[in-house]
């Protein structure tokens, strides 16, 4: 019980402490995270509280603000085994607000786009993330306290999907917004 409690306390301190390249990595190493040299951990990063020993971060890596790395998905007290390891190889950049799920390996030199959910392995030297946000439709009734949610839904006019380049449209054709 005490080691788990101490680990959680160290995690809380590391979350907001100064020293992204010094104190925060040192505190996470004390918790059991395997970490190389020259690692930057931004503020408010969540590194699995119950199974930090299943996280491995290589040399010269950056973990962006408010990123979460999970090795477990279960309710209740700590179990002897996690749901899977997370391995981040060397020279990896993980942008802010990313979520890394169990059983993931991020290859050497990869760059993870801000806000990405990583649920499968990322090949080395890959820029990884979902496509940029785009218009989903037109809002005719604002979603505010003056209008009910069902009014908003009735007022949304969804856009029709644009043909993709794979379907034969010219990639240099002008984009038409609603």
Image (cartoon, rainbow, N blue to C red):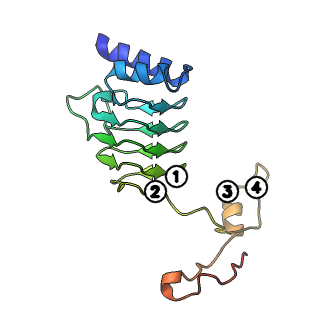
Q: Distance between the residues labelled 2 and 1?
A: 6 Å
Q: What element carries label 4?
A: loop
The nearer-to-camera label among 2 and 4 is 2
Q: How far apart are marks 3 and 1 (CA)?
A: 32 Å
Q: Name the residue under label 3.
A: 149
Give the mark toward the camera: 1 or 4. 1
In percent of width and height, residue 14 lies at 48, 21
Q: Which of 150 and 25 is in front in this view?
A: 25
Pointer 4 residue? 147
Residue beneath disc 2? 128
Q: Do the residues labelled 2 and 1 touch (CB within 8 Å)?
A: yes
The residue that appears at 32% across and 47% down in the rendered structure is 104
Could you give the CA–CA distance between mark 2 and mark 4, rounded to whole angstroms?
38 Å
Image coordinates of residue 122 in percent, x first then y, are: 36, 54
On the rendered structure, is 128 left or right of 172?
left
Secondary structure of residue under mark 3: helix
Give the label, 3 or 1, closer to the camera. 1
Residue at (20%, 28%) from the top-left corner? 80
Is 37 displayed left or right of 163 in the figure?
A: left
């Amino acid at each position: 019980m005490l080691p788990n409690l101490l680990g959680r306390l160290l995690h809380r301190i590391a979350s907001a402490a100064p020293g992204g390249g010094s104190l925060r990595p040192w505190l996470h190493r004390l918790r059991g995270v395997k970490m190389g040299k020259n690692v930057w951990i931004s503020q408010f990063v969540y590194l699995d509280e119950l199974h930090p020993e299943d996280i491995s971060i290589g040399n010269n890596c950056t973990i962006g603000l408010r990123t979460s790395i999970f090795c477990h998905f279960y309710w209740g007290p700590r179990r002897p085994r996690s749901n899977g390891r997370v391995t981040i190889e060397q020279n990896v950049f993980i942008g802010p607000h990313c979520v890394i799920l169990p059983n993931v390996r991020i290859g050497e030199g990869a760059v993870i786009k801000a806000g990405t959910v990583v649920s499968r392995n990322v090949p080395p030297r890959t820029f990884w993330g979902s496509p940029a946000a785009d218009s989903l439709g037109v809002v005719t009734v604002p979603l505010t306290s003056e209008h009910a949610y069902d009014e908003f839904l009735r007022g949304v006019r969804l856009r029709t999907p644009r043909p993709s380049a794979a379907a034969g449209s010219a990639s240099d054709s002008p984009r038409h917004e609603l």
